[in-house]
Image: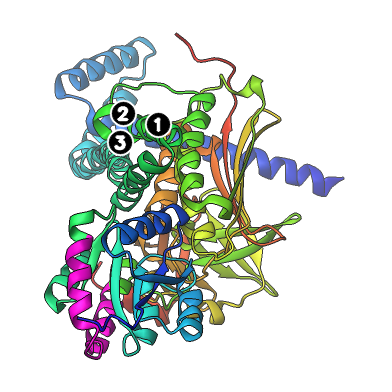
Amino acid sequence: MASPEKTVRALIVDDESPMRDQLRARLHDVWPELVIAAEASNGIEAVSMADLHKPDIIFLDIRMPGQSGIEAARHLYNRCHIVFVTAYDQYAVDAFEQGAMDYLLKPVTADRLQMTCTRLRAQLESAPADIGEQLQQLTQLLQRGEAKKPEYLRWIQAQVGNSLRMISTREILFFQSDEKYTVVQTAQAEMLIRKTLKELADELDPDEFWRIHRSTLVRVDAIAEVTRDERGRQMLKVKGFPTALEVSRNHANLFQQM
Amino acid sequence: MSASQFNKGMDFLRDAVAEATVLWWSFFDWLALVESRQLLITYFLVFAFGVIVNLPEAAVWFIIISYGVKVLAGGKRKAELVAKDATAQADVATLERRLAEARMATLQAQVEPHFLFNTLALIGQLIETDPPQAAKIHMHLIEYLRATLPQMRAAAGGTTLGRQVQLSRAYLAIMQARMKERLAINFDVPDYLEHAPFPPMMLLILIENSIKHGLEPKIEGGQIDVSATLIGGTMHVNVRDNGVGFNMKSDEGVGLANVRERLRILYGDKAELVIEAPEGGGALCSIRVPFSMMEKH
C-alpha cells in the first residue's frame, strides 16, 4: 500500500476526448484519491507531459496519431507504471496476456478498473516492471500486421495538366524510356514523367516490375504472353494493350521456360 | 504527278492483296472446319457448275487441291481455331471470377472491428453523459451497419448517389463525435445529382481511406470535402482531405484497388478512379462515371 501522505498522480492519454472523460470519471469512482495530473491526446504529447508532471501511473491508448501508445511506452516504461487502454487490438491483447502487462478494454467497466487499481496500489512501492524487451517485440508485431514491404516505391507522380496525378504501381502496365522522358502506360492513359528508367528500376520492387529491354520495364502481373516473331525475337504482350513489346536478348532468359 | 499515281496504284494493289489474304484465310478456316457430308455436297455442286460452264477439268482440280489442303493442313488449323475459342471462353470466365472476387473483397473489407468497438465504447460513454447524443450516434451506427454488413447489403440492389452520400454522412457523423474538433466535414452535392445511379460502397471506401490514412494520423486533424459535379456527360464524385498526404512507399491498399476493379467491370473504359496530390497537401480521390438521369424502376 502507498503511504497515506503521498499523493499518487496519473496521466490519461487518448486521442478521443470522450474516452478520456470516461476514464477520468471511472477512476474518480474507484480511486477518489488519485490525482489526474494531466491529459494528453497523442504519443508525443504524452512523453512531454510525463517529463513535466512526473506521474506515477500512465493510462495509454494504443492507436493514436503521431506516435502510438506502444512507441510512447518505450520512452516511459522505466519512469512510471503503464496501463494500456484499447478498444480492439488482437495482437496487442495477446501480447499483454503473455507478457503480464496490465491493460484495459474500452469501454472500461468499474469492476475491471477496480482490479487494475488494486494491483497498481500494490506495485507503487516497487520500481516499474522492465517491459522494454516486450515492447520492442510488440512494436515489430504491430508493424508486421500493417505493412509488409515498406521499402519499395508504390506510387508514381505525373503532371497531368495543372494537377499532380498519383498513379498506383498496381495500375501500371509498363514504363518505356523516351529520349528525355519516361512514358508510364496504364490501361487507360499514357503519361510522361521525368524519372529515368534506371532510377525506377532501383526504386521499384524487383518482383513487381521486370526489365525486359534497355528501355522497357514491365509489370509482371500485366504480362499476357511471350511469343517469337518471324525474325526470332521474343515479343511480349501486355493485358489490355494492343502493341507487343520487344524482349532484348540480354533479358531473354527471363522467359526461357515459357 | 506520276509518282502520286504510282502511289495510288500501289495502295490499290496493297488493299487488293490484303482483301485476298482475308478471303483466302476465311476459305481456309471454312475448309478446315467443314463436315465431310457438307464438303461432299459442295464438291457435287462445284462439279455440276464446272460441267455447265464447260470447265469440268478446273472443277476436278479444285476438288483435288482443296481436299489435299484439308487433309494436310486442316487438322492443325482446326486445332488452332478450337484453342482460340477456348481462350475467348476462358477470358469470359476470368472476368466473371474477377467480378466475384471483387465483390467478395468488398464484403470482407468492410466494418473494421476497430471502428465498431471504438464507436460502441463511445456510445457507452455518451449514455452516461449525454443520452440524446448517444441516441443520435446509435442511429448513425445502425445506418452504417445496414449498408455495410454483407447480409444486409445483398438485398439492397441498385443505389443512387444520394443514398451513398447519406450513408457517408452517417459514417462521418460518428467519426466526428469521436475526433471532435480534429475533424471538419463539408458536403457539396447538388440536388439534381442525388437521383443519379452510383455503385454502392465506393464513396464510403474513399472517405474511410481519407480518414484512416490522411486525417487520423495527423495530430491536429483536418478537413474532408465531399463534392459532386457534372462535367460533360461524366459525373465526378470527389473526396478531398488536407491530411498527411501520400506515403510513396505504401501500397494503395485493397479498398482503392477494389474500387478501380469494380469500375472497370461495371463501366469498362467509360469510368475511372483518379487520384491526385493537391497543391495544399493531402489527397484527392475522384470517381468518374457516365451520368444517367434516373434509375429505372
Q: Which residue is mark 2?
A: B153
Is residue A152 among what the camera can see? yes
Which sits in the foreground, A151 or B162?
B162
> Mark 1 or 3 closer to N-term?
3
Which secondary structure dominates the residues rendered in magenta?
helix
Q: Is residue B78 left or right of residue B256?
A: left
Q: Position of residue B87 (x, y in %)?
A: 27, 42
Distance CA(mark 1)–CA(mark 2): 24 Å
Which stretch did the figure color magenta? A113-141
Chain of the residue that carries numbered disc 3 in the rendered image = B
Crowdedness of circle 1 by 10 Å Cα count: few (<14), some, many (20+)? some
Please give the name of the residue rendered at 18% of the width and 80% of the height, measured from the top-left corner. Answer: A122
Chain of the residue that carries numbered disc 2 in the rendered image = B
Please give the name of the residue rendered at 37% of the width and 15% of the height, measured from the top-left corner. Answer: B54
Q: Which residue is mark 3?
A: B92
Please give the name of the residue rendered at 49% of the width and 36% of the height, measured from the top-left corner. Answer: B168
Chain of the residue that carries numbered disc 1 in the rendered image = B
Please give the name of the residue rendered at 38% of the width and 37% of the height, measured from the top-left corner. Answer: B25
Is residue B62 among what the camera can see? no
Residue A124 colored magenta? yes
Q: Nearer the viewer, mark 1 or mark 3?
A: 1
Asked if A233 appears above or below A224 in the picture, the reply is below
Instruction: Give SS at disc 3.
Output: helix
Distance CA(mark 1)–CA(mark 3): 49 Å
